[in-house]
Structure formats: C-alpha cells, structure tokens
Amino acid sequence: MGYVYLYVGTGAGKTVNGLGLALRSIGHGHNVVIIQFMKSWKNTGEYKIMRKLKPRYKIYLFGRKVWVDFKKPALADKMLAKKAIRFAEKEMKKAPHLLFLDELALAANYNIVSKYDVLKALRKIPARTDVVITGRYCPKWLYKRADFVNEVTDVKAPKKTVTRKGINY
C-alpha cells in the first residue's frame, strides 16, 4: 500500500506543497491525478498547466462556483464531494503514482464528505500509489490514518491579503 501524506494548517502553501510533489513525480515519468474538492475555478496555474503536462498530469474539479458555507454545507456540496471520492476510487484502480486529494481534509472536517467514504477509499490505495491530502482544518481520525503529517503555519504575512498570479493561484 502507498503512503498517505497530509498537509494541513492555517498557513498558506498546502496545495503548493502537493503540487511540488506532483511536479517532482512527473519529472520521474510518473502519472499524477489531482482531484480538487470544493474548487471549480479553472483560472489557476495548476489547472492551466494540464494542457502542457498531459498525459502524465490530470486535474479534476469537484466544486460549485459559490463558496461553501462550512457552518451549513449545501446538499450540492456534499453530493459533489461524494462524487469526487467515488472518482478517486476509480482513478486508484489505474494505480497512478501520485493521487492528490486537494482540500479533502477540509471537506472531511466539516462533514461535507463522510469519514466512512474517505476511510473506505483510502483502504483501496494500490501499492505504487502515494496519496497527498490537503486542507486548512482536519479531523483527528485523518491525522491518525495518515503516514506523514505536516502542519503549515504562517509565521509572517502582510496585514493586507496578497493574491498574485503564479504565486497564489
């Protein structure tokens, strides 16, 4: 069974950590599948690069065009998250070298995707497939399931939010 790498915390850079691993993996000729939970925006660098890196790099978005209300998630958000988990299970059958489940920890933390569905999927990881999971917040059971856990924290940042093309998206 492959390893599960978890990147969580309130700091910036969790998705970027996973994308760095994806780039490294592609550099070795490996296949990478990225599934983004609760994201739908195609104007990100990680989505746009797919055209150049196919067939080794594939990214799939499972989110609505509106922000998720974490206090009261919509049924549509839960259905998309369930669809994303089922899609991840299908992709695992193809045994990619790296399966990146972006924002799964956050979706699990707010019960947008069920503990049962996540753990069931993670039991199906092929031997050659490593899994990266990211998210700002994460339930304890996912910390326990992961083989590697990295917490990302901001040490210093400007008071004004900065969003730069190529850095933040």
Image (cartoon, grey):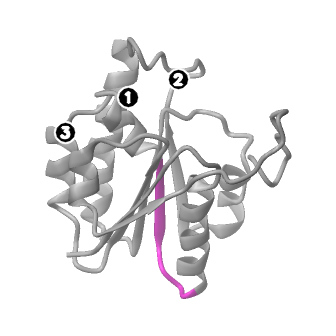
Q: Give the residue number, with chain letter if any, for mark 2.
A: 64
Q: For residue 149, what is the image quadrant?
A: bottom left
Residue beneath the point at 28% across and 28% down: 111
Tell me the tag on residue 80.
Answer: 1
| Residue 137 image offset from top left, x and y in percent | 43, 40
Instruction: Give whichever of discs 3 and 2 has the lower sequence position.
Output: 2
In the rendered structure, which segment of residues is drawn in magenta? 28-35
Query: Total of numbered circles in the picture?
Result: 3
Residue 26 vs 35, above or below: the answer is below
How many C-alpha atoms fall within 10 Å of the one at disc 2: few (<14), some, or many (≥20)?
some
Amino acid, disc 2:
Arg
Gap between marks 2 and 1 measured at Cα: 8 Å
How many C-alpha atoms fall within 10 Å of the one at disc 3: few (<14), some, or many (≥20)?
some
Q: Are marks 2 and 1 in contact (CB under 8 Å)?
A: yes
In this view, the mark in front (1 or 3): 3
Gap between marks 3 and 2 measured at Cα: 22 Å
| Residue 158 image offset from top left, x and y in percent | 84, 42
How many C-alpha atoms fall within 10 Å of the one at disc 1: few (<14), some, or many (≥20)?
some
Instruction: Give whichever of discs 2 and 1 has the lower sequence position.
Output: 2
Residue 97 vs 141, above or below: the answer is below
Amino acid, disc 1:
Leu
Q: Nearer the viewer, residue 150 or 33?
A: 150
Q: Are marks 3 and 2 in contact (CB under 8 Å)?
A: no
